[in-house]
Amino acid sequence: MEPIRKHTGIVYPMNRANVDTDQIIPKQFLKRISRQGFGEFVFYNWRYDSKGELREDFPMNQPKYEGTSILVAGENFGCGSSREHAPWALLDYGFRVIIAPSYADIFYNNCTKNGILPVQLSEKQIQELMERAEAENYELTVDLESKRIFDNQGFEASFDLDEYKRQMLLNGWDDISITLGYEEDITKYEEQRS
Amino acid sequence: MRKPKTVIEKIWERHIVKEEAGKPDLLYIDLHLVHEVTSPQAFEGLRINNRKVRRPDLTFATMDHNVPTIHRNIIKDQVSKTQMETLKKNCEEFNIPLADIHHPDQGIVHVIGPELGLTQPGKTIVCGDSHTSTHGAFGALAFGIGTSEVEHVLATQTIWQQKPKTLNVKVNGTLGTGVTAKDLILAIIAKFGVKFGTGYVIEYTGEAIRNLSMEGRMTICNMSIEAGARAGLISPDNTTVEFLRGKRHVPQGEAFDKIAEDWLSLATDEGATYDAQVEIDADEIEPQVTWGTNPGMCLPVSANVPTPADGDNENESTEIAHALDYMGLNGGEAITSIEIEHVFIGSCTNSRLADLRKAASIIKGNKVKDGVRAIVVPGSFTVKRQAEEEGIDIIFKEAGFEWRDAGCSMCLAMNDDVVPEGERCASTSNRNFEGRQGTGARTHLVSPEMAAAAAIHGHFVDVRNLEVVTPS
């Protein structure tokens, strides 16, 4: 996966709690057998009308948010299905960072396997970011090395991330190669058990 | 004296391959279940990197999400067809056992694992599917993973996991007549919320849990993920052992008694402690119906749908308004006045023989209400065969239900079993998310009995007020 160290981008505010992976990528798009090309279907049922036309009244479709790469959302983001198509779709659309008060476990994990940085901030901090991003074309910088988030208007916050996951994201490591380095341990474990 | 441990800690300790400071534990996986939707990219990853499947003998695949439940030989959707053919090719290439669409063992992955005895107490079980938590009913540590992790488990038979916190959900008392495991888990989620289990593995304990059949326990553990918990389990006991006795993949004869002894030793020790605990009284639970767009938006059948004014704060009021709008409900109306056009009895939550028997007991001698389309989708071919041997299919068919072949079907509507836009379904599945059963479809989650009663009446009714006929 592509490493992520420091990222600056336009914020898209999604002021909803419990956004589930069925919303992020509806099931009719799960039949493909590759990891690519899911971006155009992200939040499909909200972004498109029943005829398949882009809905102009859905904020994400507005020019103001074109090129957005930082998604700010409500609590329990990514709940529901384990489908990794959800982070694939977000990444393919252009999101590299998600900021929310809390995440569903499987989704959170899936993000870190795909080079998406899931940041956890407080409800109050999220509200502040939502308000700014709703009002204007709002740019934010997320620095994974120093675990800090800031804009050029005085907002600043620090965040925490499991150190192992942080190293994986910073370096873009493939954890299968790392685990295969433990092959002797795995074989030993199998022998002891049989 | 040895420190008392929970079943979760005992299973965890048995499976640590490598423990290092500052890192998650490397955990061994005993059983890896695979289906067609979340695996193709994982196998492709193996091929690109020239990697093998480490333990095909600990891996088992089936087709369930996409499969048609009618006219099996004609798969109109070419993309679905390709996905199924891809799984077949992958299983052949990597030597993985597969119950394909025509195999007598085919069915929903979380129904056939226990049915075949692949699911056993003390095992670590993963699958690229969030409802893998179902297998926790047997005292196994079972959880859903993403496709990257599917690839990781295929290649290494291990997974990196941070040791989870433990949460005891204690259910006191006994469930009343007509109140089922489904009502219990819905009531738990309604009471404690859709994320109270996030970051935890749940153990369900207490008298009401002990009294549940294995089918009921599977329904409970299945929906742990709807409470945010990746895994939920129940300590093994005699009910667990007797369910597994004689199943194809468990040891037979004396060897079974020996392994059963080990299984029972995994039960949580008296005096073991958890990181958190909640309690609920089973006696107070009524049959439940979800009214909104997540499983926590759920009320007793005797209640009225909330209005935005019932929200505790502005955010909650907005959420209620949003859900009412999607669901086409006004707020304030009685749950029993909600009329439905579709009934779905099936899914990894409620498609086992015991579920079908209970639904049939309500259906027998009745007719599906005019204007209601009702389908039964058995969880596996085995369930279907057993139900037909008992004549349960006849009860459903005579009442006007469609009797289908096994698969995930209308739970997530990846095949042709779709609820049309704006229409309403009483469903025994696990998720009432927007668009889950079809774009614009409106889902109400209920027990098999409640779904059956809704099929007859065309609206929700309290099953406790119905006369129940036991199918002979």
Image (cartoon, rainbow, N blue to C red):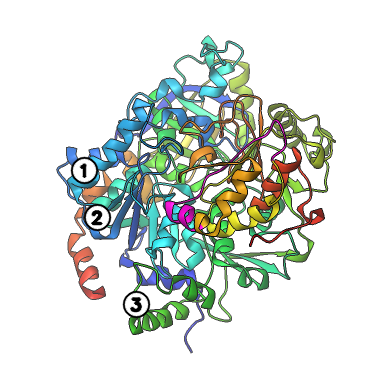
> In front of the other: label 3 or label 2?
3
Task: Look at 51% across and 49% down and name the residue there.
Answer: B378
Q: Residue at x 66, y 25 (%)?
A: B422
Disc on the earlier residue, 3 or 2: 2
Residue B46's label in the rendered image is: 1
Label 3: chain letter: B
Q: Quadrant of residue A147?
A: top left
* Quadrant housing the N terminus of chain A: top left
**A61 relative to B48 in the view: left or right:** right
- The picture places residue B273, in percent across and down from the top left corner, at 57, 73
Mark 1: secondary structure: helix
Density class for disc 3 (Cα within 10 Å; few <14, some 14-19, many ≥20) is some
* Quarter of the image where one finds residue A96: top left
In this rendering, position of residue B139 left or right of residue A6:
right
- Residue type at the position of mark 1: Leu
> Which residue matches tag 3?
B252
**Mark with earlier residue (1, 2):** 1
What segment is highlighted magenta in the picture? B368-386
Q: Secondary structure at mark 2?
A: helix
Pointer 2 residue: B156
| Whether marks 1 and 2 lie on the same chain | yes
Eyeballing the image, is A27 above or below A68? below
Question: In which quadrant will I find the C terminus of chain A?
Answer: bottom left
Q: Amino acid at mark 3?
A: Gln
Amino acid at the residue labelled 2: Thr
Q: Are marks 3 and 1 in contact (CB under 8 Å)?
A: no
